[in-house]
Amino acid sequence: MAKILIIEDNEQNLYLESFILQKNGHEIVQARNGETGIALAAKTRPALILLDIQLPGMDGYTVARELRKNQTLAHIPIIAVTSYAMTGDRDRILEAGCTDYIEKPINPDTFHLEIARYLNGGVTRGTAA
Ligand code: MN
């Protein structure tokens, strides 16, 4: 069981992701914009960060870059949760420092299993130096 920070401005997505992960025993910290997300990451030191790319104000790419600049947070897996499925966006997401991405809409039946994979350290793609 892990502490997971969700940075997501869409209330339905935030609710669904939180609900599924809490049901599977995880502790959830919520942020509805990038600035709050960065502050809460530093304050709560989550084991994993789920990051929406389309956020009001600071977008997800910028949030990922800012998180990677902070040495105490740089090791935390960041999983982008995004409706963007274009190849260029995938590259952009990984270049920004995200570990991987999950496409929206999330599958409620498998979402927690995907997250468990990242928590167990099974995915190293895009891991920040
Ligand atoms: Mn959004």
Image (tube, rainbow, N blue to C red):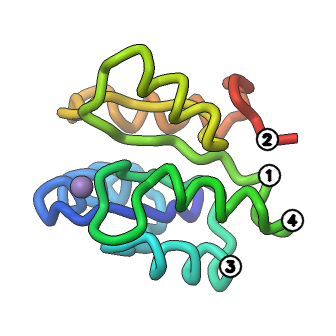
Q: Which residue type does callout 4 highlight? A: Gln
Instruction: Give the x, y percent position of residue 104.
Output: 23, 33
Residue at mark 2? 128
Q: Is residue 22 above or below residue 40?
A: above
Residue at mark 1? 75
Residue at mark 3? 42
Q: Is residue 90 above or below residue 115?
A: above
Cα–Cα gap, marks 3 and 4:
10 Å
Cα–Cα gap, marks 1 and 2:
7 Å
Q: Which residue type does callout 2 highlight? A: Ala
Which of pointers 1 and 2 lies earlier in the amino acid sequence? 1
Q: Are marks 1 and 2 in contact (CB under 8 Å)?
A: yes
Query: In which image quadrant can residue 100 be found?
Result: top right
Which of pointers 3 and 2 lies earlier in the amino acid sequence? 3
Q: Which mark is residue 35?
A: none
Instruction: Give the x, y percent position of residue 95.
Output: 64, 34
